[in-house]
Image (tube, rainbow, N blue to C red):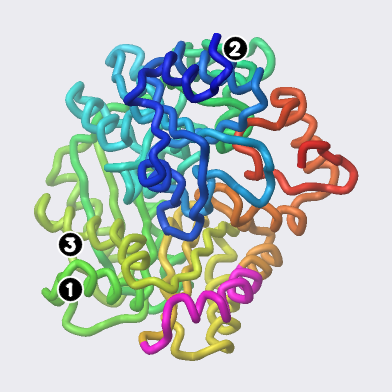
Amino acid sequence: MTSNPIDYLREVVGHANCLTDEVDVAHYATDYRKVYCSTAMAVVRPASTLEVSEVVRYCYASGIAVVPQGGNTSLHGGAVPALDRTHLPCIILSLSRLNNIFSIDPVDDCMLVGSGVTLAAAREAADGARRLFPLRIGSEGSCQIGGNLSTNAGGTSVLRYGSMRDLVLGLEVVLPTGQIWRGLRALRKDNTGYDLKQLFIGSEGTLGIITAAMLKLFPKPRTTCAALVATASPDTSLALLKLLKERLGHDVTAFELISRPALTLVQDYLGDEEPLFDASHDWYVLIEAISSSEQADAEETFHQALVEGFDNNLLVDALLGTSEASIQRFWKLREEISDAQTKAGGSVRCDISVPLSAIPDFINKATNQVLGINNSIRMVVYGHMGDGNVHFNPLRPNEVDAQDFLSAHGEKITTIVDSVAISLEGSISAEHGVGVTKRDELLKVKDEVELETAWRIKQALDPKYLMNPGKVLPQISTCQINLL
């Protein structure tokens, strides 16, 4: 075995897949929002689980930190090195070449995929087998299944199908020592002790590296109904959701709340100049319902529910998705809000969740406090109202420089928003994970017993603290880690 780490890693993955050029490394070491610009000794791109295992085994023996990376779409710096918390040499381990779709089983309704498969490719493969993989998020063309699992991604269909914790049957994981745990079972019921896969889902690569997953599939719906409705307030939106769940049951797949500034921003970004409604409104909701009924019957039930909502003053206008093109337009407006903010610059990204009943109170309190800083701040608020997840992202006033706004107000706004969420028994991260951005905030929201227990799990699996160091876990006084 060569004593030079780069030479050895090149022997494992091939010269072309061990990148050391400064420009190449910088591409992988810079996060999606270009907030975290880091560095690494190399970017290693294995093509199989065995190669991942060998790379990790070598790094474990050599004291080299490993930062797993999927599509690098993390909003909290979770997929690039955290230089503030490790003095160790590190590599970025890109899983993008683990992109095989190994099998699709329409009887067991499951699909075996590599962790580097993009979400869009997984959804397309399922569709080709007349099945549905329901996770749907705006970055589906670039985010990868491994990353979706590592952050327990939710998306716009959680209301019916749940998050990634609910959508996976089994995992294959390379442990920090290089050992491979092959837990790729397709069982719906397995009551034989600890459910190990749940340890790795949501752990952001700090306990091991997911290399493959057995995903749940579902029958494709026969019909899809959608509408973009205008509503007076979050309170009326919540009442409308309650009505729709009573009338349509589990057919309600998505209920996406969108503020007027958010819709204006994304229409400008997309150059979508066609008016949606005759007048502008303060709040909008994108509603989707799927059904196994005939199209005409499903549409009649859907429309009747909307009419009842109108008669009860829960909505003031509605634009029906009368064609696939119109439904796609609705979803494009919703899914491009994130990129529209990135393009605009100066957005404070807060991803919180509160109980459904507390959503109106949260939005009103947080909005009032943020506008108290500057009443020209654009209140870009949107999210999955059906599961209590709100993306509350105040955006700089038009006339203010993005960096100046973030430097002056970013931390204060985050503190305001998170404090309001916590006061309402909520969470400061609903689906974007913790990464670096939210890491130390956990000291405010997690009790000591919970953090100690998390650290004990980390130490048991990763005693050398080499797996994505500096992410997820804050340092606590009662659990000192020598390598920190």
Q: Which badge, 2 or 3, comes first in the chain's sequence?
A: 2
Asked whether 392 falls inside the magenta stretch, the response is: no
Q: Secondary structure at mark 3?
A: strand
Q: Position of residue 29 (x, y in %)?
A: 46, 46
Indicate the amino acid at tag 2. Answer: Gln
* Segment tinted magenta in the rendering: 399-417
Residue bearing the label numbered 2: 179
Query: Which is nearer the eye, 379 or 258?
Result: 379
Relative to residue 413, is residue 468 depicted above or below? above
Residue at the extreme right: 478
Q: Residue at x 70, y 23 (%)?
A: 461
Q: Residue at x 24, y 31 (%)?
A: 220
Q: Secondary structure at mark 2?
A: loop
Indicate the amino acid at tag 1. Answer: Leu
Q: In the picture, which quadrant includes the N terminus?
A: top right
Asked whether 414 falls inside the magenta stretch, the response is: yes
Q: In the picture, which quadrant includes the C terminus?
A: top right
In the picture provided, is 165 more to the left or to the right than 422?
A: left
Query: Whole-Å distance between the Cαs marked 1 and 2?
Result: 55 Å
Relative to residue 58, is residue 289 depicted above or below? below
Characterize the magenta stretch by its predominant secondary structure. helix
Query: Whole-Å distance between the Cαs marked 3 and 1?
Result: 11 Å
Residue 276 tag number: 1
Relative to residue 168, is residue 297 depicted above or below? below
Residue bearing the label numbered 3: 320
In the picture provided, is 32 more to the left or to the right than 210?
A: left
Label 2 Cα neighbours within 10 Å, binned few <14 / some 14-19 / many ≥20: some
Q: From the image, state whether disc 1 or disc 2 is nearer to you.
A: 2
Q: Which badge, 3 or 1, comes first in the chain's sequence?
A: 1
Q: Position of residue 203 (x, y in %)?
A: 60, 36
